[in-house]
Image: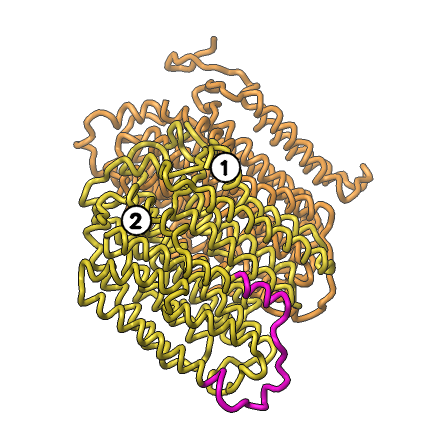
Amino acid sequence: MVENDAFALLAVFLIPLGTAVLLMLVPSKERSLIIALTAASSLAMFAISLYVFLTYDFGGDQFQGVKAWDYMSNVGLLGDEGIQLKVGVDGIAAAMVLLTGIVIVPGTWVSWKIQNRMKDFFILLYILTAGVFGTFVMLDMFMWFLLYETALLPMYLLIAVWGSTRKEYGAMKLMMMLLAGSILIFTAIFAIYAEAGLGTFDMVDLYDVGFDEDFQKLYFPMVAVGCGILAAMFPFHSWSPDGHASAPTAVSMLHAGVLMKLGAFGIIRLGFQMMPEGGAFWAPALMLVGITAALYGAISALRQTDMKLMTGFSSVSHMGYVMLGLGTMNVIGWTGAVLQMFAHGVMTALFFLLIGAMYDQSHNRDIPNFSGMAKQMPIWTVFFVIAGLASLGLPGMSGFVAEVHIFIGTFRVYPVIGGLAVLTAAITATYLLRMFSQAFFGEFNPRWSELKEITIAERAGATVLAGTILFLGLWPSPWVDRISTTIAQTIPGVTL
Amino acid sequence: MTTDLLGNALNLQYELLGPEIAVAVTAALVLFADAFRRELNLGRFALPALSVVGLVVAVVLSSLWIDENKDFARLVTVDNFTTFFRFVFLIVTLVVIVGSHEYIQKHVSHPGEFYSLLLFSTVGAMLMASARDLLTAYLAIEVMSFSLYILVGMAKNDARSGEASLKYVLLGGVASAMLLYGLSFLYGVGGSTQYSEIAAALSRDTSDVQLPLVLGLALIIAGLGFKASAVPFHMWTPDAYEGAPIPITAYLSATSKAATFALLLRWFAGPLLPAIDEWQWMVAAIAVLTMVFGNLVALQQHNIKRLLAYSSIGQVGFMLMAITAVSDNTGSALLLHLTGYLITNLAVFMAVVAFYNRTGTEEISSFRGLAQTNPYLALVMTAGLFSLAGMPLLAGFLTKFILFQSVVSAGYTWLVVIALVASTVSLYYYLQVIRHMYLYEPDGDPSRWRLTPTGYLTTGVLLGGVLFVGLYAAPFYTVADRAIAPLFA
């Protein structure tokens, strides 16, 4: 990446923000104009995010495309560099930018069939997207957190207005738990700034401070729990299945696909990179939390009959793998963790897209009510099976690449936990295959003979996601190269 | 050069008091114009227009003294801090008058007296920020308060208004008495009513006057705590807010608070700073109580004015943290936060005024379906409430962030943790209002309605301000920093 690619990073979060502002000016009756605008915007985001990912040079510096614009400086408690609009990505962030670009495209497409207040939906969705992109590309701690919160705020209205089932409960629970997490992150940010005494929120400068070990031990868990709530870290995961179950399709997709990764990303950015010694100290705890979540999520998923709730608990389980990978404190485990963030994001987005496509017609997501759906909706079933196989870690799919890295990393430090992780993968296979056999195959239930195959927009979206799953599964090196070099370069204390 | 009896040189440049004189003269003119309304054949826009002209003149006169530092007759200081608050108070009054003249016309019993008293109370507020002598400060407080006692009772056909006024005047009288008693202790200890001489006296060894000093400080904090509606001196606030005409509620939550904080900063960063060990714990305790109590009680409110009353109590708690950890950094952060708070709070109140003009109700449940009947007003309310809760891209996030950071940097992390929890609680009750507007169908008439032109003007400007401060607060922060500088020179 050359320095001017900073403008690409700037564009990637200004485009959704600008689209949201433009949408406010469009009359809500002009549906086709809204669709055209969001189509163009989503494709632009995808193109830029792909560009960012591909041009990230894994032989070069850790942070690339770095550029800073002054925002507030030399006033009050702020020094020369004060608060800046500072963009830049490392290999991890580049992968996350791509993930967001991939998920927003189908997320936009499937939302065009919303009838009720579509314009308002897109305004909020794109503000959320701007927050997500911004969090991945910002290197200033203030801006980072501002955009992190921006990504959370629209969730409430998105779920409460356009959601289903217990939507108000789900929305409020999600909001309150995530904001409780924000309290911890806020505290840590204030403390980091005060402790460093540099008068700047520039994270790259703060990384070099070398905080006192006791300080790190105290504040790392605050960041880990604060961001961990968003990553559905056990035992703070309870908002996530409820939230996913009640959210509208595109929001579930973005939420499980991208927002939860924001939490894990925060643990890396603000936790491990800022306070590596604190991270090393708490790593075993993180592993323990991770494996508990993985097992607990998988076992809970076994018991679910609502497809969305099952996927929600499956997400808890898969995010547990991420924590497990981060806790290994070796390059291979970490690479697995970041790969898992990416792989799970794409796969869950595909799950929610498909469940939403079916639920819009049937208004039913109870697995026992379905049978032989492969006859009625063959294309839908094919995509669903691809997502499922990726989820259970079939070789050749994205999930396998990620999980195998995590397992190897885990076996290097705690073989027992590694064994439990493999057991989790087996449970995952159980609940998914059982659902397949129950809902997709066997005798066709004539109650569903009215259901139509998924629409062109949904097929196109599903193809993008399924293609990514296979691409990453068959040729993971573009990801592995970027992620593992960044990890080796940047996280002191992480060994091979 | 004139001197006083003790031989101190006095500077009698009356143009230093230009803005105060302009506003006071306007207030008198408004009274006259009102008395001879028929003879002069005045339309219904005459009084508000006259007030606006006077205020604009005062704004221009204030701008003459930017970056000056002079005093008038050892009673009033005109420095950047004074100028900052002159601008703040004048603009608040301007906004209140422009945004609610329609309401005043319909729901206030004596419009002429109303405008006149509003202007007088603005004069009092401006003098509170600029006084450099305890007696001047006390008189300024009383000028502001007495006008407000009457204004609170001026709502037409509303028994709550008279009750609110009576409560406010009785409790306000007690608070003033406490304050005056505290000031007399301070005079006894410091030997002067001049801020600079009290500061010098308290810098020397005060161990032999420890008891009167602490007693005086406690009484002063109680008195000012009442004016700022800090817990446990907040009892009058919800009733006064609920009973008062809505523009006065807005004014109470804006000018009356800001003036009290101007005074707190003048005193606690000036004459009382040497005695910080004696008062710091008291202010910290009150700050904690105020944040926690204000935000918890707000959870149970059904009336939007009462909700905003408790929410403003909670906000006072956040601001008191900055007084606890007073320094130039926390001071400028406090002024920045105050600016953001005033803009946001006025935006919400002006939206409530517009809503009340149309519906005549203040119940939170009556906001149902506002997103359908008036999406613009719903947007203003939502932006304002989210900003009060400290949500990103809006003024509240940035100003709270800077305020909290400055308090943590001053070593009070524990206070900020409590503030963060309280702030999160506050989002819950703000969301209740937002929920009514967006999630439900309107109860009554579902047709769209519009605001008056001045309603659009004020809410639009304030909404713009909320967004501007949220997105780019650097100019405001710079101004706040320059305003606080003279206190720590």
Colour given to chain A in the rendered image: yellow
| Residue type beneath disc 2 | Gly
The amino acid sitting under disc 1 is Asp
Question: Neighbour class for label 1 at 10 Å: few (<14), some, many (≥20)?
Answer: many
Q: Which chain letter goes with mark 2? A: A
The part of the chain drawn in magenta is A438-464
Indicate whether residue A461 is drawn in magenta. Answer: yes
From the image, tell me which residue sits under label 1: A5
Q: Can you tell which chain is drawn orange?
A: B
Is B76 left, or right, of B460 in this rendering?
left
Residue B141 versus residue B173 in the image, above or below: above
Tell which of A452 and B155 is nearer to you: A452
Label 2: element kind: helix
Asked if residue B390 can be seen in this view, the reply is: no
Q: Chain of mark 1?
A: A
Quick one: quadrant of the N terminus of chain A?
top left
Disc 1 to disc 2: CB gap under 8 Å: no
The spot of residue B89 in percent (x, y) is 55, 36
Q: Separation of disc 1 and disc 2 at Cα?
A: 27 Å
Residue B98 vs A181, above or below: the answer is above
The percent position of residue A58, horizontal first and vertical second, equals 38, 42
**Of B4 and A367, the residue lying toward us:** A367
Residue in the image at 63% along x and 70% along y: A455
**Which of the 4 quarters of the picture holds residue A303?**
bottom left
Residue receiving disc 2: A271
Can you give x and y, in whole percent of width and height, for residue B237 in the image?
47, 53
Q: Is residue B159 above or below residue B112?
A: below
Q: Are marks 1 and 2 on the same chain?
A: yes
Taking B461 as reference, is A147 left or right? left
- Residue A328 visible from this viewpoint: yes
Report the residue at 42% width, 71% height from top: A389
